[in-house]
Image (spheres, rainbow, N blue to C red):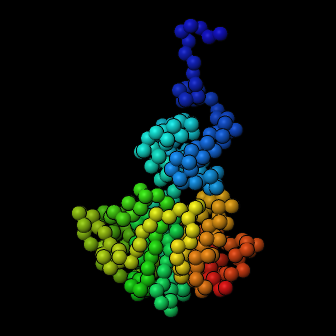
Amino acid sequence: MAAPNAQMVTADDAPEGRRRAVDPELEALELELLLEAVARRFGFDFRSHDRAAIRRKLAALMERRALHTLSQLQDRVLHDVDASSALLRALGVPPATMFDDVQEAVQLLAVAEQCLPGAPLPKVWLADCAGAEQAWTVAVLLAERQLLWGTEIHATVTTDAQLDEAVAASIPADALPLYQRRYEEAGGTGRLADYFEAHGGRLVPVPQLRNRITWAQYNLVTDASFNEFQLIVCRRALPDFGPLLRQRVLDLFDGSLAVFGALGIDRPLDRQARMAGHYVTLLPGLSWYKRVS
């Protein structure tokens, strides 16, 4: 029996180095309860996401907020709007900066030149878009080849907060030199500054570019197909999806892609998947596909 004046030391308040090791089974239970709570309370279902990816993202969030257990995180998320917003942001696709993946930009442009010309009103879907700067990158690439002005870009994000951020986004003027270098590495031949104008001390795309992008809140886990597209790109969100959710999303894309349209994903299609027979590889050795049937 403890002495009358002794204090019990728990896993949550023990000094660093004395904290008890996490029980893997308990942590797994906490994670499932947290994901269930998020689905029921906020309507965002991460239960089919890859567990290793979720744990990695949540660990970073907990460190930033000085939380020691997933149960603590769940309590904050259910009772604190700021915490719930932070969690949804952490579990989503990290925001991109313009031309942050030069090779992806080069590949996307090569694919767009094959699948967009010839369609009466080409449509591009950036599914689970990594924020405004990813969409602006695609718009600039298409403008570079005179493909933008007859094309609709549909950029979808998971939460209303992400949607608000994308619509109101801007960049600091001092970011342009870095973005210009990346743009040139991706094959750009003009001045990136020509696509932007000053607004409140920062830069936003010119209306001709901005008006080609339609933003919407859309949940890949639960929502149905909403249009037919000539190009669908989802390379940054798919790695976090578990096998069943991944197949569900690929089936969604298959049902949304026009014949002779192109699909850009994170890794090669499983040749045993039921949709695989509809596609041929567009770029050798890379995960860009053309739908042929």
Q: Nearer the viewer, residue 61 or 255?
A: 255
Q: Residue furthest right?
A: 272
Residue 143 makes an appearance in the image: yes
Counting from the top left corner in percent of width and height, residue 19 is at 59, 29
Counting from the top left corner in percent of width and height, residue 255 is at 61, 76
Counting from the top left corner in percent of width and height, residue 277 is at 72, 80
Q: Is residue 224 above or below residue 1?
A: below
Residue 53 makes an appearance in the image: no
Q: Residue furthest top?
A: 4
Counting from the top left corner in percent of width and height, residue 153 is at 45, 76
Task: Classify residue 212 as left or right of residue 118.
Answer: left
Task: Classify residue 212 as left or right of residue 247.
Answer: left
Q: Nearer the viewer, residue 287 or 37?
A: 37
Residue drawn at x 57%, y 21% is 9
Residue drawn at x 46%, y 86% is 121
Q: How many marks?
A: 0
Which quarter of the rendered picture does the N terminus lie within?
A: top right
Which quarter of the rendered picture does the C terminus lie within?
A: bottom right
Q: Is residue 197 above or below residue 11?
A: below
Q: Nearer the viewer, residue 190 or 131?
A: 131
Residue drawn at x 58%, y 79% is 257
Q: Is residue 47 above or below residue 191?
A: above
Residue drawn at x 45%, y 44% is 83
